[in-house]
Amino acid sequence: MTTHAETGQAAEIGLLTRNPWVARRPLTVAEYHRMGEVGILTERDRVELIEGELVAMAPIGSQHSGTVNGLNRMLMQAVGDRGVVSVQNPVQLGDRSEPEPDFTVLRPRADDYRRSTPSSEDVLLVIEIAASSLDYDRAVKRPLYASHGISELWIVNLAVGEVEVCRNPAGDDYASVSRVGREGVLEPLLLPGVAISVAALLG
């Protein structure tokens, strides 16, 4: 049975969605971190900060997690000491966004980013594994990464078995978007010589 509180909460969400002109008070990255420090957010809360708002992350199924495991192994072997392969860890993009991509390949740094969260200047490549999150990755994550100048994004589309390769950020999108199928090989622009088979990635 739906309670009055639940009905009221749903109505409030609907009213704000239908009235985007209503002023919101976005969170900063510093405030987001503070929420974790004082226990308002915990590791069980699968959220990321996007443009000052907390966004729930999609549940991870076995196809998604298995793809992450396999690609992690391939990237570690292919990249070696030329980059830091970071799995489902945050990247700070300005003062109001801290997404947690499935993968970032970062510029090597002696402290392995212990002292501070990486920013867009540290990123060589971002990869998102998309099962149920494909629309979100395309409509929200892609323009976010482009607007912060991240040079290359791969969206692994598990449903159709291909990878969308987005390059050359221009405003809030990428000037070059191509799709690579199972027969293809992925080679990051900023990591020449690194090659990932799409067939092996998809399993």
Image (cartoon, helix red, strand yellow):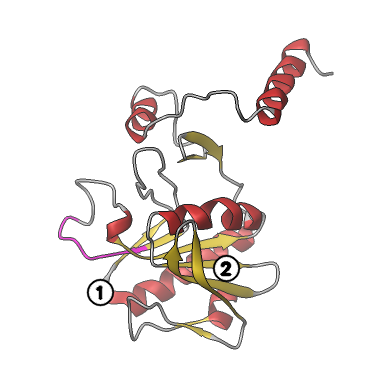
Q: Position of residue 36 (x, y in %)?
A: 38, 29
Whether 28 is drawn above or below 150: the answer is: above
Q: Residue furthest left?
A: 110
Element type at mark 1: helix
Q: Quadrant of the N terminus?
A: top right
Q: Give the residue drawn at x 52%, y 25%.
A: 24
Whether 52 is drawn above or below 187: the answer is: above
For this rendering, which residue is in front, 117 or 43? 117
Q: Quadrant of the C terminus?
A: bottom right
Horizontally, residue 127 falls left or right of residue 91, namely: right
Q: 10 Å neighbourhood of mark 2: few (<14), some, or many (≥20)? A: many
Element type at mark 2: strand
In which quarter of the view is residue 184 placed?
bottom right
Mark 2 or mark 1: whose residue is earlier in sequence: 1
Give the extent of the magenta segment.
105-111
Horizontally, residue 15 falls left or right of residue 38, namely: right
In which quarter of the view is residue 57 placed?
top right
Q: Position of residue 41 (x, y in %)?
A: 45, 28
Whether 136 is drawn above or below 66: the answer is: above
**Residue under numbered circle 1:** 82
Structural distance between the alpha carbons of marks 2 and 1: 23 Å
Residue 72 drawn in magenta: no
Q: Give the residue drawn at x 47%, y 24%.
A: 25
Q: Give the residue drawn at x 19%, y 46%.
A: 115
- Specify the amino acid type for callout 2: Val
**Residue under numbered circle 2:** 156
